[in-house]
Image: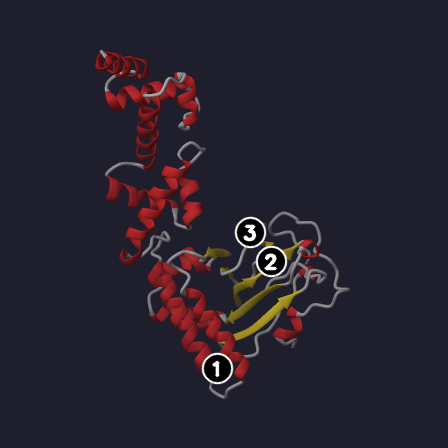
Amino acid sequence: MMRLNEFYEMPKNHPPCPPQRPAGHLDPDIFQRMKMISAFVDCVRNINMPNDVVSLHSHDFYEISLFLSGKLRYLADNKRYQIEKKDILIVPPGFTHCPLALHTLTEPYERIITCVSKDFINFFLSKWHAQNVYKTILNRPTLFKTSGTPYEFLCRYLEYNAIEANLESPYADAFLAGNTLCFLSKLMEAHDIDFAPTRRLKKELIDNIISYVKKNYSKKITIQTIADEFHIGKTALLKLFKKNFNCTFHQYLNLIRLNAAKNMLAEDLNLETISEAVGFNDYSGFYRAFKKEFGLSPKKYYAQIHSSAITAEY
């Protein structure tokens, strides 16, 4: 049995990551199926150098990585992730993964790896009725970008795992198991079935979404854009808008754009230029939305406010 620390310090002459094949058609020899040391939770701190080579592999346990430094791309189940400091990546058993293009890194990347057995996860799911967590977080690779978000506190649990594992205390196994349960429970507390945040975090999330939309309304934004940006399930986000704004996301976005257009109409700008500047794909769509919202066309509104301005001058 290869120990975890032996695996994560891969020899430099290890065969490189082969070209990606369709899901379900990977050669068995690229799988590096490792075995855990303990029955429940293991933890190791690891540094990869730019000249290291790590091939595509999978495990029979859950791998929870907290990235401490370095910026890199990471492949998990045919999806590429841009990894940054304080990101948490959860890779369930059987999903292939590996860092990409380590040779392009300008600095080493360091991470804390907590390995959790399937038996331990099943125990957690059965005792705390946490099937929602499994459906949304633990049944596929999931990346949490915690830096600067309300979820940053989750990093501390994984950092404590590394500290305790390094002490080699006779009670380390008990601590790792208990602390990882706390991590999973906090993860469950922070997300519902669709990654919706708890009530404690909703106001801050809503404020952040409003701020994001107001800064980016001129760009191509969809409900999926917001879901990806804030790591929230699309269904939960739709419910969030309906409950807090009594409208759909599309209606809210259009209102922000139309109010911005009203302000721009006070200036002497071309109507089609304004339409494009506030994020509409074509003028006809802008025209219909404007007239529906304000009861008159953009051209008539423009004429009205400029007529009022001329009258006021005299």
Q: Position of residue 295 (x, y in %)?
A: 23, 19
- Amino acid type of the residue that numbered disc 3 sits on in the rendered structure: Tyr
Which structural element holds mark 2?
strand
Residue 33 visible in the displayed image: no
Q: Nearer the viewer, residue 238 or 126?
A: 238
Q: Is residue 148 above or below residue 117?
A: above
Secondary structure of the residue carrying numbered label 3: strand
Residue extending farthest right: 13
Sequence-first disc among 2 and 3? 3
- Residue 49 quadrant: bottom right
The residue that appears at 44% across and 82% down in the rendered structure is 174
Q: Which residue is mark 2?
A: 97
Q: Quadrant of the N terminus?
A: bottom right
Q: Residues within 10 Å of mark 2 (few under 14, many from 20)?
A: many
Residue 11 position (above or below residue 202)? below
- Residue with the mark numbered 3: 81
Q: Mark 3: few, some, or many residues within 10 Å (few <14, many ≥20)?
A: some
Which is more toward the observer, 222 or 48? 48
Query: Looking at the rendering, which quadrant does residue 279 occupy?
Result: top left
* Count of numbered circles in the view: 3
Q: Are marks 1 and 3 in contact (CB under 8 Å)?
A: no
Q: Mark 3 and mark 2 in contact (Cβ < 8 Å)? A: no
Mark positioned earlier in the residue sequence (1 or 2)? 2
| Pointer 1 residue | 173
In this picture, residue 22 sits left or right of residue 38: right
- Residue 58 coordinates in the image, percent (x, y): 60, 62
Tell me, yes or no, whether the two marked residues, 1 and 2, touch with CB atoms within 8 Å.
Answer: no
Q: What is the spatial separation of the Cα atoms under label 1 and label 3, in whole angstroms?
A: 31 Å
* Residue at 44%, 69% in the rendered image: 156
The residue under the point 77% across, 64% down is 13
